[in-house]
Amino acid sequence: MIASFGKIVTTMQKDNEAIHDKDETNKETSKRLAPDAVSTNGSFYPSIDGRWKDWLYRIYKLTSSQPLIMTRNVKLHGTHADVLISPMNVITFHSRNRQLTVPKNPGDHDIHGFAAQGDKHRANILKLKQAYPDRFVALNPTIARKDVGSMIAGEWIGKGVQRHVAIAQLELRFVVISVKINGSWVKDIDYPDIADEEVRIYNISRGGYFHETIDVGDVEAAQARMDTITKQVDERCPFAATFVVDNKPLHGPGEGIVWKCDEDPGNALLWLKTKGTSHLPKQNVKPKPSKEETLAERFVRVYTHERRMEQGLEYLAESNIGSCDRKNGYVYAEWVVKDLLKENRTEMIELGLKEKEVERIAKSRALKWYHEDLGRRSAEAKL
């Protein structure tokens, strides 16, 4: 039976009100993430929501057109990386969690060589910085240009950054995914040709932009359509397929898709990411607990999957927090708990679970995983 859009929205309104109430009482959670150890100069790029129902609710509240015209592009599985250029052409490099610096002095920190590579090509970056506002002015002659600098958001991909995707076979490179000009995110499809591939700066348009009409009045059909398209990328990454490795087109899995609403493409609240099943938990949470574990324990076990645990280690690395120190296990566990509550809060509320109980179980599980992983890495280092 087709789900009623109105019924979904009514349910989500209640859930979002509950989420808001919970968030108001838990604002201190993020402050517990080692504030003295982590730079606040991280990414200014929004975290794209992957929660279908939450996105649907915002679509209903913030858009006027039905059905929706969506522009989609490939979501790359690398590490997020930003280039910020000030009005005075000062260039800085950022990961999701901190500002990066070329390793020259104690305290300098890079991630997978992104800042070092960018530092070599500052002149090329400045040319890109000029190309974007030039195009913006040509497309928007009636909008006053503000000299507030530019932000080029992208993904740093290639060998050693991630695993289990086709682009992991490529040499390291930067892929532009979004650009902020005049203080706002611009429509990506208007800037598809701005790149400098000679110095390994690519544009996400290389994997194609595609338009889809999504009728959110028929919720199940809309989600099924999105899932079908995402599955195609999961099986064969169209961005990777544009490259040749060992004299053959690069075939292999991708991660997923980023969707943006044509009515308001610069509004990050309306962006959505969908991931292929190979990047999602392998097991669904059943509505009833088993004899071996409570529902809360089952929920935590399913959603603190291996990929989330690995992302916690990546967070420590990006933040220049040692992942080989037992005392940093609590920083790690706090990150895992925060990410779980951010990404899977809707599922938690739907199951009627209490946040404090989920937080306690997740923290314990994350600490156990961290110490076991530390033991494995220590044993491997001795071989």
Image (spheres, rainbow, N blue to C red):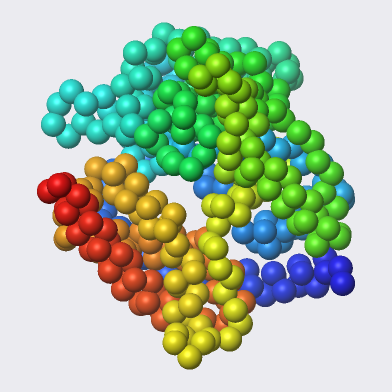
> Furthest residue to the bottom?
291
159 w.r.t. 215: above or below? above
Q: Residue at x 23, y 56 (%)?
A: 376
215 w.r.t. 127: above or below? below
Front-most of residues 322 and 230: 230
| Left-right relation of 55 to 219 | left
- Can residue 351 be seen in this snapshot? yes
| Left-right relation of 4 to 295 | right
Front-most of residues 247 and 221: 247
**Image quadrant assignment for residue 285:** bottom right
Residue 268 location (% of width, % of height): 62, 44
Q: Residue at x 58, y 36 (%)?
A: 252
| Left-right relation of 368 to 202 | left
- Can residue 186 be seen in this snapshot? no
343 w.r.t. 297: above or below? above
Residue 91 location (% of width, % of height): 38, 21
Front-most of residues 199 and 278: 278
Residue 93 location (% of width, % of height): 37, 28
| Left-right relation of 247 to 364 | right
Q: Residue at x 76, y 67 (%)?
A: 9
20 w.r.t. 324: above or below? below
For the N terminus, give its image quadrant: bottom right
